[in-house]
Amino acid sequence: MSRRAAPLALALAGAVLAAAPAPAAAEEGAFTRGALGGRAYRLYVPARAAAGPLPLVVALHGCWQTPEDFALGTRLNAAAERRGLLVLYPAQGHRDNVNRCWNWFEPAHQSRAVGELAEILALVREVERAHRVAPGRTVVLGISAGGFMAVNLLCAAPDVVHGVGVVAGGPYRCGLGPLGALQCMRGFQLDGAAAAAACLRAAGSRPVTIRASLWQGAQDTVVAPANLNALETMFARLAGAVSGVTERQDGALRALYRDGAGRPVLETWLVPGLSHAWSGGDPRGTHASPLGPSATDRMLDFLLE
């Protein structure tokens, strides 16, 4: 939300959360701080030597969170160490949004040329300059405001983003401005088909070829579960999904969609009992719950297999 919309901050954040706890010391690589053009970030570089270029994960935190908090709750650094991944954590500060929410609902931050999306893409280029990043292996993960922003990033830059993982997010441009954002989060004004068409218009002449892993807690009262259905429709259209199979896995309801060539392109997970939280996460982090399958591992399996 913009500074002018500060009175709506707590509603968008969903809850007043405690200060972010310190990150766990489970990883072995380097978790470094940096800034580019005023945009702060953290970068995790695995300790183990790589035989070649590494996939890059862009991790977008939710409201009230910090990169350290998000890394703790998702256990993403530990997963990156095991798998040999670079993880970029762009940081949203209080000066940009009073509650550190990404301003996903403001048109000024939905273009690759200006605003927060442009700054995130500049950070990606900086990581590519400093490290060997595997071509076609950049994916974006996010929760809540970070999940909405991940969808924006895909639509604005499908030539950069090749996979997206979303927890408690919603379809592209489902709500504009703070009031529109609240309506979207509450489950109103959702149209997955219109979102897919708007995403294609934003992409312009760039082809949108992606994989998507979409997650939602069935008990989420901040982002209504109806958003998962709209996201499912949106990404099924974007990915050209022609068939789907739904089954229960690890206590959750998983749907898998394939394209005309039989390739898996989209999965959705609805986790019973889960509220506004990262499934299978570390509860020492905010917006993270031990309930459900590990969203981190399942996303990375699906998006980078």
Image (cartoon, grey):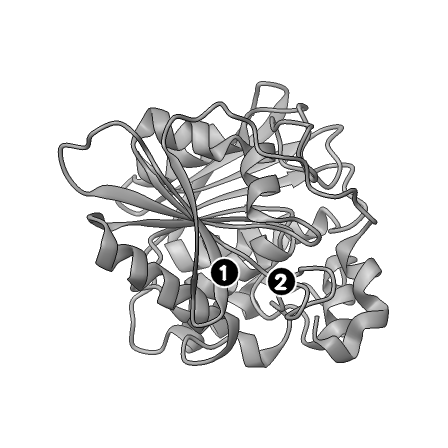
Can residue 46 be seen from the camera position used here? Answer: yes
Q: Position of residue 76 (x, y in %)?
A: 48, 34
Tell me which residue sits at (26%, 27%) in the image: 48
Amino acid at the residue labelled 2:
Gly
- Looking at the rendering, which quadrant does residue 103 occupy? bottom right
Q: Is 255 placed left or right of 47 in the picture?
A: right
Q: Residue furthest right?
A: 7
Q: Position of residue 185 (x, y in %)?
A: 74, 58
- Residue 286 x %, y %: 70, 38
Along the line of sight, the residue nearer the viewer: 4 or 174: 4
Residue at image location 66% in from the left, 70% down from the top = 95
The residue carrying mark 2 is 93
On screen, 193 above or below 268? below
Vertical placement of residue 119 versus 26, above or below: below
Few, some or many residues within 10 Å of mark 2 (<14, 14–19, 20+): some
Look at mark 1 in the image and give the residue it sits on.
40
